[in-house]
Image (cartoon, rainbow, N blue to C red):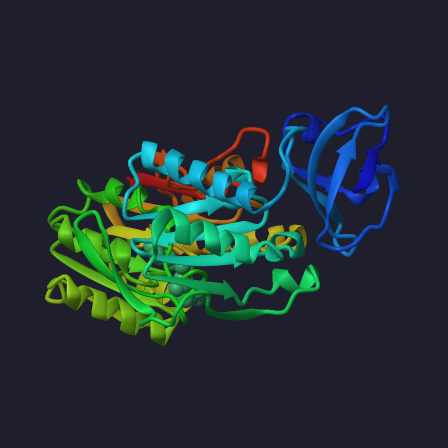
Amino acid sequence: MTKVFLKKKISRRIEEGHPWVFGNEVNLTDGDLTAGAIAEVFTHDKKFIGRGYLNPQSQILVRLLTRDKSELIDADFFYRRLLKAWQYKSQLGYRENCRLVFGEADFLPALIIDKFNDYFVIQTLALGMDLWKPSIVDALNKIFSPKGIYERNDVPVRELEGLPQQKGFLSAPFDTKIVIRENGLQFFVDIENGQKTGYFLDQQDNRRAIRHIVKDADVLGAFTYTGTFEIHAAHYGAKSVYGIDISAGAVAQANENAALNKLDHIVRFEAMNAFDVLKQWGKENKRWDVVMLDPPAFAKSRDSIQKAITGYKEINLRGMKLVKPGGFLVTSSCTNLVQPDLFLQIIQMAAKDARRTLRQVTYQTQSSDHPIVWGMENTHYLKFLIVQVI
Ligand code: SAH
């Protein structure tokens, strides 16, 4: 097996348990650097650190899968890890829907598996993980006897690993428009054509956090996708809910979801660009009791952080101006490139420009089926804030 020896001074990141080994952290290698193959990683003085998969084409030369010397990487390894992930999520109370595997945070770098009751959606985002897809599918079949498994590998990051973008069935074909339940409501999930894996499970715990503030309120939601926050608002007693998303497909799906829950007399969605209309409505003095914003990641790489800061500030400023005095702003950011402190600063800047005072109601992160592992800072990515806007 190929051996990789690190430089004498190894990074705190690796010492503290982070699974990535960058090429520039390596002193010496012994054996072929075959993309996807398993390698053993050692300190400069030959102490075993762990086993992981290689990709010499990537800046991350090795992603560690285990630090246990006696643990081999084989089909049974994946079965054990998936079972452990499921036991952990079950222990936290997740039953029907959860992110079963959240990559590094479930000790399976570059693997994402979402469980939507009896259906599973998989992403293998690195070559070394992609090669184990058959073992991963076998493990899912063994543990869950699923009704269907689907691959949503139509993601650009795969190209950095020399992998094609692709999607399709990893089980017998099934109707990919399924229905899931969340907090007593029902939602259509389009596994084949929806965004990412089809549905944002990472906000599932946060959606309950709006239940008191939306009662009897007129609510505006922007960046609604499946309309899940907005339909929750209607369910929790909002007087009216108006949701907008730039995607006509998302809006159609959100309206279907409203009807599925018999809440379409309260909540209605339309296709619009939030940046344009929020500004316009501000000028027209339109106001709501509650404004909810859940924009996409404005930053995908470190180079675009400044752009993201501008985007988040702009949209929050516009959103805040639409809140009646004493009403509430519900706002999120889903990129790990904007760290929690920075996000809060952005909101503070927006409040200053809008000349409003904020009183914090709730500050949360992603739901706990997307674990945050301390020492792996990129596992903490979602910020969710509710403030009263005075
Ligand atoms: N709130 C949703 C997730 C939103 S994802 C949930 O709880 O599941 C972000 C959404 O923002 C996407 O649906 C995308 O279509 C939409 N979007 C992106 N740019 C937009 C814009 N300028 N105006 C309105 N919506 C936009």
In the picture, the quarter occupied by the C terminus is top left
- The quadrant of the image that shows the N terminus is top right
Q: Quadrant of ligand 1?
A: bottom left
Of 109 and 66, nearer the camera is 66
Q: Which residue is pictured at 82% across the width and 38% down the height?
A: 4
Q: Residue 316 location in percent, x, y?
A: 41, 51
Judge from the rendering whether residue 327 lies leftward or rightward of residue 166; answer left or right. left
Q: Report if residue 317 is visible in the image.
A: no
Q: Is 80 above or below relative to 305? A: above
Say which quarter of the image contains residue 83: top left
Residue 178, horizontal then vertical, whole percent: 28, 65
In the rendering, at what x and y percent does residue 49 appear? 72, 29
| Residue that appears at 32% across and 39% down | 387
Return the residue nearer the eye: 18 or 326: 18
Image coordinates for residue 73, horizontal then vertical, percent:
63, 42
Q: Residue at x 48, y 45 (%)?
A: 102
In this view, the residue in front, 13 or 37, is 37
- Image height of 9 relative to 35, above or below: above
Quick check: 188 left or right of 216? right
The residue located at (54%, 50%) in the rendering is: 111
